[in-house]
Every structure is written in C-alpha cells, then in structure tokens.
Image: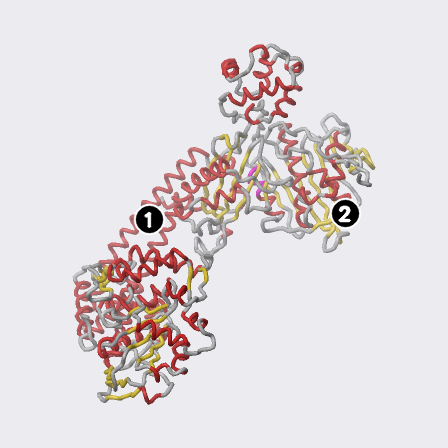
Amino acid sequence: MAGTQTDIPKMSKTLCNRLLTDLENARRPVLEAIKCSLDNANYSGKLGYLTPGDKRVRTELNVSSVQKMSRAIFLLEILLRNLETGAVNTKRELYYISKGEVKHNPELAPLDFTDQSESDSIVDFICEMLVCYREDLNCFANDRGGQTYSDYLVVTEKLPSGGSATVDLGSLGTTPFQPKNRPQSLKLRAKKKIDFCLVVESEGTANTFVANGFCKRHKSILVGAQGVPSNAVRGWVKLIQDQLRIPIYFFGDLDAYTMQNIYRTLKAGSAGSLIRNSDFSAPDVRFLGVLPEDIKKYDLADYAVRETDLQEARALKKAKDALANDPFFKDPRNKKVSQILKWLLKNKRRCEQQAYFMVDPRDPAKPEKIIVEKIKKKNYV
Amino acid sequence: MAKDKITTSSTAEYFSKNLQQVGFSSATKAVLTTLKEAVDNSLDACEDAGILPELNIEIEKKGNGTLKNTDLIRIKVEDNGPGLDLDDVPKVFGEYLASSKFGRGRCSRGQQGIGISAATTWAQLTSARGAQVTTKTKRMRNAVSMVVNVDIRHNKGLVKNKESLSKWDRQHGLSVEFLIDGRVQLNGEGGLLTYLQGTTLVNPHLTLTYKLPDQEKVVIKRVEQNCPQVPDATMPHPHTMKLGEFIHHSHLFGPIALKSWLKKGFTRVSDNIIEQMVKHGLKKEYLAKPVNKLHQSEMKEIFAAVQKTELMAPTTRSVMTIGEAPLALSIRRMGEIDFFSVVTRKPKICDSKPVAIEVAIARFLDRQGPRDEEDSAPVTVLRFANRVPLQFDKSACAVVRAIETVNWRSYGISQRTNNLPLGPYVFAVSVVSPFIKFKNASKETIDASDELVEEIRRALMQAGQRLSRHIRREKKADDLERKKEHIEQFGPILVSALCRIVKAPAKRKKQATDGLVKLLGRELNQAKEQLVQAEVEVKKVVAQREKRLGKGKGKKDEDAEAEA
C-alpha cells in the first residue's frame, strides 16, 4: 500500500499542489487512479489473491470532468479535516456532511450530491488515487457479519487513545465477538491449541451450531459470514490465518452466487477492491461444502435453478463469464473450485447448507458431525 | 338427426348481431366509427368525381341514450360531392356488401360496402331511426331528403319520409345525419380530434369545418388545389390468384381464346411469357380454345403451368401517394412546428401486392414536454391505411412494429430497445395499397408481414436521417450551454478548494483561475465551432428540402435562416 494514515495528508497536499501548478500554467491537470476491475486483475497462485495490473484510470480536466474533479477535491478536504481531528464517519454520514457543507455555503451548491451512490464513488476514487484503504481516511462501513465464537481465543485491541483492551472470547458465553473494520489493530492469541476455524455463510446456522455446543466439543473458532463477506469479515479471517496459522474452512450453499461472490471474495478478494485484497483476503480458506458429491452421498434435497428468476439467471451468466475471464477461476491451482462452477452451470441445480439438517432430522448435531467428518477425511477443495 | 331446422340468415342479420366486429364495440367507438364511415364515403365520392372536397361535420349531445351510461349523439356529415341518385341511396345506406369498389383493386378508402350500413343499423338499434339522408346530383332539380332504414331480415334498404326540398344551399352534394347512442371522446388515441387531425394531415386537398360538443367551430382550409387522381385498377397478376379465383376470372371474359384471355385478363403476360408457359407444361392446343369451353381439369393444368412460369412482379401503377410537398404543407395545419421531415417512398411490391409508404415526423411547439428525456412520454403515432386514420389495436400493427424496430437513438431520439421512441414528436405513417391486409373486419390493424414491416422501416429510417440534423444541432447548442455552465459553476470552487488545502496565497489563486478559464475556454470555442457546423448542415438540409418541396419550413428552420 502506498498510503497510510500518517502520509495521506502529505500525499494529498502534494497532489493538490501539482494540480494547482498545472492550472497556473494553463496545463490540463490529470488525476490518476488504479483501475479496479476484472480486466485489470491478476492472480498469482503464490500470493493467493487478486492484485491490480498496470491499467490506470486517467481523469484529465476538461469541461465534462470538472464536476468530478471538483467533487473529489471537496470530499478530500472533508476527509483531511477528519484525519486532523480524529473524527470517524461512515459513507452515509459523509454524504450528509457534504450536504451540510453545501447547505451552509450556497456557493458550493453545484457540488451537491443527489444520491449517496454519487458520494460513495467519489470516496472510492480518492482511495484508488491515493492507493489507500477507506479506513485510512477514517471512513468506516457498518460492522456487518463476522460474529465470532470460540472458547480458546483471546483478542487484544490497540485503542486509538494509545491503550489496549483484551477480550477473552471464552468468557462471552454464547455472545459473539464482533470484529471491527480495521482488524489490523487486533492481536490474537490462542489459550490452547486451536484445531480449525469454520466460516459459515449463514449467520443463523452459525448461531445454531454454537447453541448446540459446537465450540464446547471442538477446539475451534466459529465465524458467521452473513452472506457476502464485508471488509471486516475479510480482514478478520485474514488475521486468523496469519496470526494463528490454523486451517480455515468455509461452509456455505452450493450455488454459483456463493462460489463467485462469497467464497472467492473471502479467499482471493474482489475485483472492485484490488488495492486492498492483500490485507482483506485469506488465501488458505478451503471450501468444505456443500460439494456436488455431498448431494448423492448424504441424499440431500437439491433443486433446479430458476432461469426465469432474473437474479439467478444473472448469477449463471456471471459464472460463465468468470470461468472465461476471472483469473482466480482460470488458475490451475483453483481447478477444483472451477470444476464445481462448471458442474453448477451444466446441471443447473443448487443445494443449500441447511440441507444437512435433513440427513438425520432427529439429531440436531448431525450437520456438525458431517462437517467434522469431512474435515477429518479431507473431504473439501 | 337434429330436431332443429337449419335456416339461412341474411348478411344484415349477421352484422346486426356482430356490430362489434365492424367498429361498434363500445359507446365511444360507435361515435368515432359512424363519423369515420360517413367521412370516408364523402371523400371517396368527391375524389371519384374530381371535386375538391369541402366537408362540414357537426356532432352534438342531444340528451341521454337508451343504453346505460350513454348519451344520445347527433352526427351530421355534409359534403359537396356529386350526390347520390335516388335509387342508390337505399343501397348505400341500407344494404350490406353493396359497393361500387369491392375487389376492384383501387386505393379507395371504402372497399366492401359494410361500414355505413353498419352505422345505419347501429342508429336503428339504439334510437329507432336509421340514417337521415339528403342528396342532390347535378341533374336533380331539388334536393331530396329521406330516412333510410335497414331491412335486417332481407338485407335491403327501406326508404321512409321522402320529401323534396325546394331550398338547399348547394348545387350537388350529400348530407347524412345519424342519431345514435354513444359517448364523445375528444382526445387520446381513440379521440375524435385525433381522427380529424389525422384526416386533415393525409388529405391536403380537403377543406374541413367541424363543430364538436363544448368546442368552438373550427375551419381548416385546403393547402393543395389539385384533386388527387386515384389510379385505375390494373389487371390482376396471375401469381396472386388461387385456382378458384383463376377459374372465376375466366368466366368474366366470355368465348375468348385462352391465349387472348391470358394476355388481356392479366398483367405481366406477353407472347414471350406464353411461350415460357408452354415450356412449363401448357398444352399448345389449349391456346386457341375458347376459355369458357375449357374443362375444369384443363384449367387446373393451365393454372399449374402459369404458376411454374417466372413473371415480372406486379405493376405498382395502381398505387397513389400524397406526395412529399402536399404532406409538408399539410403537416403545418396540425399546429406550430418546431421541425419536421417527410418521406414518400416509391411504390414497392410487398407480399406480391403493390404498396406505397409515406412518413411524416414532426415536433410541435405546443406539445413540448421534457425534451428527449428518458422520462418523457412515447411519441404520438398516427397510422393511416389508404388515407384513413387507424386508431385502435395499435400494438400488433405493422406500422408500430416497424417504428419499434428502428434504432431511433442513432438519430438522437430517446428509445428503450424495441419500444416506441420517446419525446414530443408526432410520427405519421401512411400505407397505401389496393390490397391492404387488415387483421380484422373493422380495419384497425394492418397485418405485420415481414416485407411490409421492412418497407415501412426504410421509410422511417430515411425520415429519421433527415430529422437527425435538426436534433444534432439542438444537442450541440445544449452541449455548449452545459459547458458554459460547468465552467462558471465548478471552476472557482475547484481552485478555491485546492488553494485551501495547499494554503496557497491569493496570487496563486488568481493565476490558477485564469489558467482554468483559458483551458476550458478552448473547449468552449470547439463546442461553438461544432454548433456552427451543425447549423450549416441544417441550413443545407432545409435548402435541399425547399428545392424539393417548395416552402414548408418549421419554426427552427426559419430561426436558422434568420441567424444566417
């Protein structure tokens, strides 16, 4: 990463100075940012996550781009003020702060955002320009997902005030620990040797496992992903991988959406966040299931993908594109994952993680037994 | 054996029970259809006699109708046509399928002789009085007024209350008045005003006076001083016939030799072609035989040989067009025009039938809504078949299908894929052919065959290309305006914010502001040049059109010239 919190103000001033000098000389100033899209994504099996290529988005000042450039500098000024005072905001709050600025200074009226998506894209553009994380600009998303349960994990957080706080997850009972959006400030320690970490796609199913005593019976960490993993979840799982060096398994639905949007993002990051995948992806995560062979093996209820459903049809089309263009799925090291995607495209079936509960409906611990058996028998990809 | 006795019904009985099939399916449609049938007849009669038509239309509410939720409506249409002989009046107004045009292959509005008799039936069924007709031909000393009813049982017209009028305000002409149950709808696709506007557009030679309920009297003068000549029908093309029609056609010619019959009775058949027919199996000995003595099996052989022989496509001489110049003048009668384009295609053969397509696209100053924006309403489509406005069931019509499949975005008009384009435009498309294939007996939808849709598309694209110059110029002007605004609005904000962040002194701020104005000013100049270029192009198009059509400019065209 080029920008960290300490050098962002300096980098910003240099950038603005360059723009101003260009204007003084009647030269067209140019803003450059890394292109964060799939066509600029590389994947190396060694690193295990998607990295940016050489492509850059150039915004040259002209009559059409003057609005975008003005908005970027306007928001940058607000963010720099936050860094100076230590104030923290969400994207939504930033949207309203910018509206407040416009309200109190009518001269800024042309900059007014009509929708949050407009200010969000400008914040992302600033990050890509300064090559820094949103969190480095004191802009945090909601802490969604990542509820973690373990009897053996201790987390120490370095506080902005300079002190620290220690949380023993074993003392929380069935209350989960919620990782923050900047997991880099956390330090992990295992009280005893932890065997594995299980990331469950459904937050509800993760809760059920804990309530049924999963963490009591197994020296494990249980994380609820709550759908597509947020930055907090991605950074948190990466932290578990790097600091504890334990096997991590992902347990989710067998469908194209889960494979591409949830599992791939957790393991290798996303094309939209190429500049942050190094700290927000956990390449060691393995896909435990539901695997296509599990359907037959455990006689699970699966069902046909409704191609008339717009969302499902889009997921299938995206899966087809991913096999052709996504460097993660094209890499030979992820051949088995690609094979699952091909199977899904060919058979157009899907199976939910909760289908394990039908194997023995009277045994609430049956899904847990299957998961542990699969880990033991290395039945994952 | 069935107990019920099998009986036959008259045509009038059938239609009196199925009036919805011929345009009387609702109270609002009943008013429109009655008016339409009367106007069609008047215009056809005037054109046949070479008279420039002058029509007076009166529609008024006379009280409550006998049917639920209807009014009693009086519809009167008066023309200056040749008038009808007294013997013909009951046939025209009281007898179904009595027509002088049926199957003749001419581009007349009326064809089968159903419409006006259906209007009389509707009047009879709802107000117990048929059509009140007044007629005077040049030869008659006085005009004669009468009531015509339909004898439904026998499909005959019955005349009542016949009286001679010593005073009538015209030398010749016809007046018809109906009292019917109905409801008046003025605007919208099925509205009377829409119908009258459409009729005005495609009949530049018509002077129309109308008075509608709660409206002022309106007079629209003709803009074309020549009465259109409806071309005579040509002989049929053998490839457009079925065997039965072929044999029936032979009966019309009496004891004439087959060879002569083939040459006289059909178009595109010559001595050379007959030799080709012989090569394709036509026995030489048949050629000299009288056609009425040929046996059915022999006719079958002859028909097969004719079908195998390659012939030239049918002639397009029987098709008439309004013409670009009259259409350009006529469209200005619909309101004040911003800009417009008209296209008249040469007649073509579609589905073995001659057809001519004409298109007029215009933007009206009084219809301006949000201009070319995604949220504006779809364009107004006016469809015409043989110069008769079509106002219902538009979605399946060949005209709408053709408009939807053209990519209007390339001409600068907003459109969602495969939908009608958006904006305050009027698209008028006229299809003229002696054999228009309608989807229903009420003649509201033209069958969308691939060949016809393609021919309409071509006409539309031509009109779109001509229109696009105007739209491009407008977009360039908008672009220039937007760029000016951007420079004025964002320039100072950008420079101020940069100066605050780097804590620059006032001198730097001024220098940067000057630099920015200089930079963006260059682009502004470019935009100005592009606008000038676009204006030159528009002027060229207007000049070309004037050369082609004479005067017929829109407001923007005049402005463009004034600026020049």
A202, above or below B265, in the image: below
Residue flagged by tag 2: what amino acid is it?
A: Thr
- The residue positioned 32% from the left and 87% from the top of the image is A170
Magenta includes B508? no
Left or right of B172, for residue A98: left
* Residue highlighted by disc 2: B126
Residue flagged by tag 1: what amino acid is it?
A: Leu
Instruction: Name which quarter of the figure residue A269 lies in.
Output: bottom left
* Residue highlighted by disc 1: B531
Left or right of B253, for residue B493: left
Image position, residue B158 (x, y; %): 80, 35
Magenta includes B201? yes
Q: Are marks 2 and 1 in contact (CB under 8 Å)?
A: no
2 or 1: tag closer to the N-terminus: 2
Give the magenta part as a residue range.
B198-202
Image position, residue A94 (x, y; %): 33, 75
Which of B45 and B163 lies nearest the eye of the viewer? B45
- What distance separates the C-alpha of mark 2 from that of mark 1? 62 Å
**Dot 2: element:** helix
The reply to whether residue B239 is in sight is: yes
Which of B564 and A15 lies nearest the eye of the viewer? A15
The reply to whether residue A123 is in sight is: no
Image position, residue B289 (x, y; %): 62, 11
Query: What is the chain letter for disc 2?
Result: B
Observer-side mark, 2 or 1, equals 2
Left or right of B150, for residue B351: left
Q: Residues within 10 Å of mark 1 (few under 14, many from 20)?
A: many
Query: What is the chain letter for disc 1?
Result: B
Which of B137 and A47 lies nearest the eye of the viewer? A47
B512, above or below A175, in the image: above
